[in-house]
Image: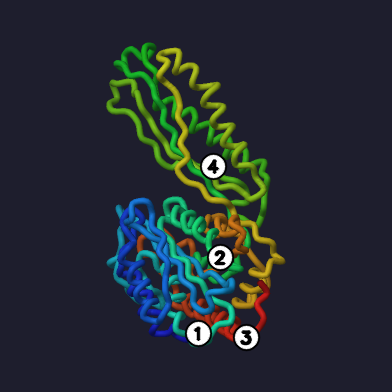
Amino acid sequence: MARPRTETLDMIRRLIEMPTVSRDSNLDLIHWIRDHLKSMGVDATLVHDETGKKANLYATLGPQDRPGIVLSGHTDVVPIDGQEWSTDPFRIVEKDGRLYGRGTADMKSFVAIALAYAPKFLAANPETPIHYAFTYDEEVGCLGAKRLIEVLKQMPVKPKACIVGEPTEMQVIAQHKGKKSWRVDVRGFECHSSLTHLGANAVEAAAELIAFIKSLARGKRDNGPFDAGFAPPYTSLHTGVVNGGTALNIVPKDCSFLWEIRYLPQDDVDALYAEVVAYAKTRLEPELKAIDPSCGFTFTQISGFPGLATDEDAGVVALAMALTGANGVKKVAFGTEAGLFSESGIPTIVCGPGNIEQAHKPDEFIELSQIALCEAFMDRLVERVKAGGAALPV
């Protein structure tokens, strides 16, 4: 396969070298994209978060009075803390047909390829516009996309379809799981560990609830419902972080943990959550409150996004299959912003370069061949949207 265009590789390099870890501002990158598009005569709308330190970007290439195709990607990346990288994660290193760097797979390469094709889209005098939607804080709960979509709902012209460029090895994804996550704070009553009968152990209460969550996870694993298109083919429950206690000789007063459910589109996530809350409140909390009425469990949702379940007969699926040459669609277990766009009424699929297995790891990389495949996708899209191009099935 031919080497990717120099313009594409230069754009990937530029974006990777602007660190945008979710806990930090992404404004340097967003302002650079805004100014880059402005130099081509394209105005962009910025939608900031409540702090003003982060922003989404939305821009339209082509006619402003008709709906077009959204190319969407998030600009934030996960931290490198504690990871052992062989190279500088914020400097592109090319080796053995790969580009190494934080965000190469997840998912600045797609954003960069879309931007590198802006001159081609504009030169095609598109009959169907291309919309860019670049968001913040996808990695911490799809926060930016939610804010951007609320603004899109108020616009007089809304997109007709959306392609989210998360790494799928350029396979067309029509379904993915949804996710909800929570923080549980357990309040106990502390005392000397030699007098456990006078205390309420928050760590042990948390552990009992975590064990119950694990039992629900085993139930889903063993009894379903199942969908073989996903891996794993069932709804999963998982506890990822636990904090509690101060010293071994003190019955701990406080404990907290983070847990999540990644659910099949047909499963009832709210019913599962209700089971967990009911177990905490009816089975575990009374024993704590018998020691002190202030003891108990508090649940706080920290993130959530819907699953994606786009009909395989939808026009956006036909378009993506034509652009990739695929003869079918697939499903993935990981979540994206696609479910939010779809929920807002914009038919959406996921399709982008790279492999999700490289995401969030040290020495993250993308194959040059994947970049070239995405360029071929964009070349076909240019032909589709230009005046007199092939009819769009969306």
Name the kind of residue labelled 4 in the image.
Leu
* Distance between mark 3 and mark 4 Cα atoms: 47 Å
Q: Nearer the viewer, residue 53 or 244?
A: 53
Q: Secondary structure at mark 4?
A: strand
Name the kind of residue labelled 3 in the image.
Gly
Q: Is residue 195 above or below residue 127?
A: above
Question: Left or right: 140 with respect to 330?
Answer: left
Q: Are the residues tagged 2 and 3 within 8 Å (C-beta)?
A: no
x and y, in percent, of residue 303 in the image: 47, 46
Q: Earlier in the sequence, mark 2 or mark 3?
A: 2
Q: Earlier in the sequence, mark 3 or mark 4?
A: 4
Name the residue tied to disc 2.
156
Name the residue tied to disc 4.
237
User: Can residue 231 be seen here?
Assistant: no
Name the residue tied to disc 1.
1
Name the residue tied to disc 3.
389
Disc 1 or disc 3, which is closer to the eye?
Answer: 3
x and y, in percent, of residue 354 in the image: 48, 69
Q: Are the residues tagged 2 and 1 within 8 Å (C-beta)?
A: no
Question: Left or right: 63 with respect to 245?
Answer: right
Disc 3 or disc 4, which is closer to the eye?
Answer: 3
Q: Are the residues tagged 1 and 4 within 8 Å (C-beta)?
A: no
Q: Secondary structure at mark 1?
A: loop
User: Can residue 160 be seen here?
Assistant: yes
